[in-house]
Amino acid sequence: MAEKILKIANSITVGELATVLDLSVTALIGELFKNGIAATINQRIDFETATIIVEELGLDVELQEKEAVAAERRTHELTDNATLRSPIVAVMGHVDHGKTSLLDAILGQKVADGEAGGITQHISAYQTVRNDRTITLLDTPGHEAFAALRQHGATLTDVVVIVVAADDGVKPQTVEAIRFARSANAKIVVAINKVDKEAANPQLVKTQLATEHNLNPEEWGGDVVMVEVSAKTGQGVDKLLDMVLLVADIEELKADIDVPAEGLVIEAHMETGRGAVVGLLVEQGILKPGALLVAGTAYGKVRTLHDFLGKTAKEAGPSTPVTVSGFKELPQFGDVFEVVKNEKEARTRVQAVRQEREKATASTNVTGADLLKRMTQEHEGQDFNVIIKADVQGSLTSVIDSLKLIDTGGEISLHVVSSGVGNITENDVRLATDGKTVIYGFNVSLPPAVKRLATRERAEVRIYDVIYELLDNARLSMEAMLAPEIVDTEIGALEVKGVFRTMKDEIIAGGLVTSGKVKPDLLVRMKHGNELIGEAKVTSVQREKTNAKEVFEGDMCGLNLEIQKKVVLEVGDTLEFFTREVVRRTL
Ligand code: GDP
């Protein structure tokens, strides 16, 4: 039995998990990283990942999943009228194993067309047709997307295509994808990619999957479909789609169409002139313009409806991704949307969700002291990760060398994740989606398609044509990472002449101000000789029985001191008064 049982929601941010486990955020992020998950403090991880991390850390803690709050997802019970719907397929896998290339190979010209319209640049859901049948494809950009999908729509993904590069084999994010698919109860189809490469070894990939992850290929008598493909040459791509459809057929996927529309928010952003632009994936019912929608804490009437290519649509049925405008504010990624009858119902629903969410955050609130402690811990040995691209080798070398000269006293280490000559590429962006890597470009450009990807993946790209400006920016970024300094300023001292009452959380005492001054709100060090016996805060100061704003050296006064734990203060002890500030440091 674990010593401690902690209840957490089925998805939790890294910061919140660090709080409940009483760990530093850095330690937690480090452990996640070792497990192939590049997470930032605000990123959500799912319950299962949290459990694994707790085990790996060897903590004597058992995590239990909190009951989901009532305002969260209700599962839709299919009626007898339910009809067949298209499968929803998530394409996942380790970085650089060819997810994007495979999606491109499947979608052909279509994505590019849509993007040219400027409508779908943020949408990560697409559709393709194979043998007159539609397949909906989800591009899950990162771990956050996995976690949100799991929290709100585990039922959303029917099939997970796990892309494994035949020349690289199973990697941490492959394992993560397998775990996601299993927790979401989705069928797995493995795409063994890059088989055109000389170093490709599909058999080895199959062996790894079978022996280490219990995914047994059909051809070896198992039940997992594995297709050898090349996103580059197109080999096997059609077969992969056929297999996806076959696996989906066995599931007999259905949805209701004659019910009010509902589904999931898969994207949300503000656009000038259009307001909130929201990507939705319809799961049940048929969504039409004019419908009044509620999603999380946002609601609004559908003003425009566009399909994934950016074309105006009259309606959208189950398994269809669409973009709508008309929401009054932005819902969150992963929120469930539903059609409601009138504004009154919309407002009541939104209010209920808001209250539930406030309650949920209130219970994980942290005290000031905890926060200070964590702020300081978090800053121990941080990495500043950069990717550098420059126009010519000479400038590349000098940018890197100059960056390395920025001295942070060893506190921050600059880590060049990758560097090269030439424009910023999609690959650079993909390496920088962890929220802690910055791409610096010197005299290079950011092609529009790469820019769109960077916006979608929230990768930080900074381009300069003056080297000093680039270096200044890097210095400022590193400064922002330095641990804040705690500065105590001495204000005065007092010799205790009388202790009138000592309670659990308060001491009332009096004495002579021997230097400086004393006033309410100052912090106090209580000393017996040279020994520190405790800390306190002045809550009020009295002089001749009335409250005083300040009392100066040479005068007697009475004090109320707030204490955290009981202290025995005696006549003759010294009180030292001071203020404490947390100051940002500069380099
Ligand atoms: P992602 O990070 O999983 O989205 O991977 P990408 O689709 O960006 O691919 C990473 C790199 O592998 C790119 O340079 C692709 O051109 C290359 N690549 C992807 N698929 C194939 C393939 O089937 N064959 C070969 N030779 N290269 C591929």
Image: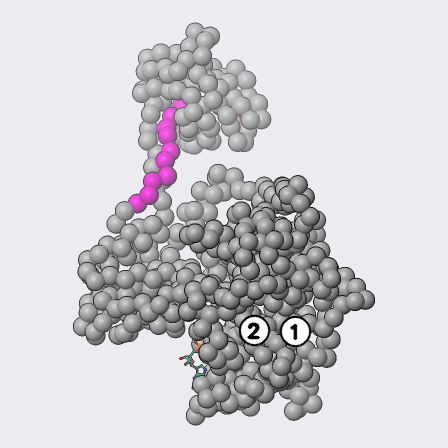
Q: Residue 336's spot in the image, x, y percent?
A: 63, 56
Marks 2 and 1, the one that precedes in the sequence: 1
Residue displayed at 55% across by 50% down: 327
- Which mark identifies residue 86? 1
Image quarter for residue 90? bottom right
Q: Residue 237's spot in the image, x, y percent?
A: 54, 85
Query: Neighbour class for label 2 at 10 Å: few (<14), some, many (≥20)?
Result: many
Which quadrant would the N terminus be assigned to in this image? bottom right
Question: Would you say 165 lies left or right of 151 here?
Answer: left
Tell which of 13 and 151 is nearer to you: 151
| Amino acid type shown at disc 1 | Ser
Image quarter for residue 515? top left
Image quarter for residue 530? top left
Name the residue carrying label 2: 127
Residue displayed at 44% across by 54% down: 271
Which secondary structure lies at badge 2?
strand
Q: How many marks?
A: 2
Q: Is residue 347 above or below residue 224?
A: above
Residue displayed at 56% across by 77% down: 128
Residue 533 shows in the view:
no
Question: Would you say 195 lies left or right of 240 here?
Answer: left
Q: What are the residue bounds of the magenta stretch?
A: 568-585
Which secondary structure lies at badge 1?
loop
- Cα distance in 3D space between marks 2 and 1: 10 Å
Tell which of 330 and 18 is nearer to you: 330
Tell which of 5 and 114 is nearer to you: 114
- Answer with the quadrant where ligand 1 appears in the image: bottom left
Find out if the beta carbon at label 2 lies less than 8 Å from the nearest ligand 1 atom: no
